[in-house]
Amino acid sequence: MASTIKDVAKRAGVSTATVSRVINGDPRISSKTKEKVLISIRELDYKINNIARSLKTNKTHTIGFICPELANTFFMTVAKGVEDELRKYGYSVIVCNSNESVEEEKERITLLLEKCVDGVIIIPASHSGSHFKDLTEQGIPVVLADRLVEDFSSDAVLVDNINGSYAVIEHLINSGYRRIGYIGGDIRLTSAKERDEGYKRALRDYLIPIDDNIIKYGDYHKQSGYDKMRELMEEKDPPEIVFISNYYMHVGATKFLIEQKEANRRNVAIASFDDMELASLLEFCKVLVSQPMLEIGNKAAGMLIQRINDSKDHEPQIIRLKTQLIVK
């Protein structure tokens, strides 16, 4: 026989009303009580009747998640963090791909409005965000992850890109490197702009001239990493080491170097933002900056649940998560 809410309440030593509040993400419930109830739900394999609950609460208990690219490991790891956290509250996730297109992002927002989602987490496709107001004007809370946008203010979960980049450049300088190249992303994107700032700030602080000849900008994809590394190696005075601002450009840059004859590699090394998949095993890599990808999703989901359950207007909150320097 299936477990009931009364069974959960009895196992946890609380009232059925408390169990209901935990399931619905009521912020008034203490973390200790919430944990007891969630453990009891898992132990009893209690199944929440979402249809009955939606009729009673006027909520569908579904959340939209929009990201620029489903094939991107970073975005999908963030999505897993979102789902892991939302599952605790009986929420389901509708994952949408914007294909790095503002127009497709608008289409996905329309779809989620039609699905009557209770909230949306967005990793923006671009620096533009005025169309996100279509959600908030319908009373649907929005949390941004990884990037901020222009013309739209909301809660957001980001990593400390500036200090992450600064730390890796500082480490390279202290290790004896002076000619440090850079392959960055589109600086209209928050993550790319901040990583660029961290790189340049560290050079300025250590009185190392910024040389535009060894600074290249790609688009966060493999081919641009390949192309920009080629451009750097064709410079008359190429860098000793190249700091690359994301994993996929790191892969592309490594591919270029592997294809070169030994004599043409110029003994270059790589430092990279992102510790994903096989990043630490890639040839030429000396240092990595690791992002807490799952935690980004966890925190974004937690913020969204709070907004869904709190109808009061609050100033947008931005959470910055720390990165970790990994030296091979």
Image (cartoon, rainbow, N blue to C red):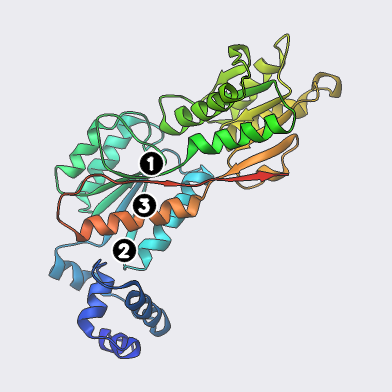
Q: Residue at x 34, y 72 (%)?
A: 31
Q: Would you say 33 lies left or right of 278 here?
A: left
Instruction: Confirm or deny contact between disc 2 and disc 1 (CB under 8 A).
Output: no
Q: Secondary structure at mark 3?
A: helix
Q: Residue at x 24, y 69 (%)?
A: 24
Residue furthest right as drawn: 263
Quadrant location of the N terminus? Answer: bottom left
The disc at residue 300 is 3
The amino acid type of the residue labelled 1 equals: Ile
Q: Residue at x 61, y 30 (%)?
A: 244
**What's the CA distance linking mark 3 and mark 1?**
11 Å
Q: Residues within 10 Å of mark 3 (few under 14, many from 20)?
A: many
Query: How many numbered marks appear?
Result: 3
The quarter of the picture where residue 15 lies is bottom left
Dot 3 or dot 1, earlier in sequence: 1
Mark 1 = which residue? 123
Dot 2 or dot 1, earlier in sequence: 2
Mark 2 = which residue? 91
The amino acid type of the residue labelled 2 equals: Tyr
Q: Residues within 10 Å of mark 2 (few under 14, many from 20)?
A: many
Query: Which numbered mark, 2 or 3, is in the foreground of this view?
Result: 3
* As drawn, 297 above or below 21: above
Q: Residues within 10 Å of mark 1 (few under 14, many from 20)?
A: many
* As drawn, 78 above or below 128: below
Q: Position of residue 328 (x, y in %)?
A: 73, 44
Instruction: Confirm or deny contact between disc 2 and disc 3 (CB under 8 A).
Output: no
**What's the CA distance linking mark 2 and mark 1?**
19 Å
